[in-house]
Amino acid sequence: MTKKTFYFLSFTWGLLYTTAGLFIALIMLLTGHKPKKWGWSWYFETGKKPWGGAEWGLIFLKDKYSGDNLKNHEFGHAIQNCCYGPLMIPLVSLPSSLRYWFRRISEKLGKKPSKPYDDIWFEKQATELGTRQMKKLKLESEENHHI
């Protein structure tokens, strides 16, 4: 996927989710949070405790303690938004949110999840898409610096 394709699809096919992300970004800006860039997405760091991340179109939120793997994963969800468009919510976002909260509640009750987070297709796909695209962007950046 190219940068132009990413933005075109985010603002057409994926507009529903991207609009929600832009609204969240506005709130984050108004509350003094500074955006940072990862790949072609923008993110805000929030929260004083490790909690993970949440993606909303071009925008994602993450805790201050998570590293590049989480950013790649959330960027992968942004790429999924380009692919699934209005189907993103029922296919990926809602199941992902429910699964996340189920796992969190289970952990608080002392039950450790039996399967890794990426064991389900939409989480694994997000990690793979984001990681692959970031590697590609890094290679392109390195090639441009050697010219």
Image: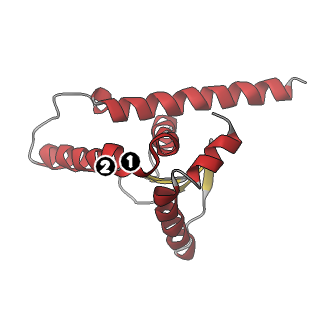
Q: Please give the name of the residue rendered at 39% of the width and 59% of the height, measured from the top-left corner.
A: 48
Q: Which mark is residue 26?
A: none
Place of residue 77 in the rendered image (x, y in percent of width and height, measured from the top left)? 45, 42
Scheme of colours in the image:
secondary structure
The disc labelled 1 sits on which kind of residue? Leu
Q: Is residue 45 visible?
A: no
Vertical side of 74 occupied by 42: above or below:
below
Task: Give yes or no for contact between labels 2 and 1 (Cβ–Cβ under 8 Å).
Answer: yes
Residue position for label 2: 90
Q: Quick one: SS at disc 1?
A: helix
Place of residue 57 in the rendered image (x, y in percent of width and height, measured from the top left)? 50, 53
Structural crowding at the residue carrying mark 2, measured as other residues with C-alpha within 10 Å and reported as few (<14), some (14–19) or many (≥20) = few
Residue found at the far right of this picture: 147
Which quadrant of the rendered structure holds the C terminus? top right
Structural crowding at the residue carrying mark 1, measured as other residues with C-alpha within 10 Å and reported as few (<14), some (14–19) or many (≥20) = some
Residue found at the far bottom of this picture: 30
For this rendering, which residue is in front, 147 or 12?
A: 12
Q: Please give the name of the residue rendered at 26% of the width and 28% of the height, measured from the top-left corner.
A: 116
Q: Please give the name of the residue rendered at 55% of the width and 76% of the height, measured from the top-left corner.
A: 30
Which quadrant of the rendered structure holds the N terminus? top right
Residue position for label 1: 87
The disc labelled 2 sits on which kind of residue? Pro
Q: CA distance from mark 2 to mark 1?
A: 6 Å
Q: Please give the name of the residue rendered at 23% of the width and 44% of the height, measured from the top-left corner.
A: 99
Answer left or right for 146 relative to 56.
right
Q: Is residue 115 visible?
A: yes
Q: Quick one: SS at disc 2?
A: helix
Vertical side of 19 occupied by 79: above or below:
above
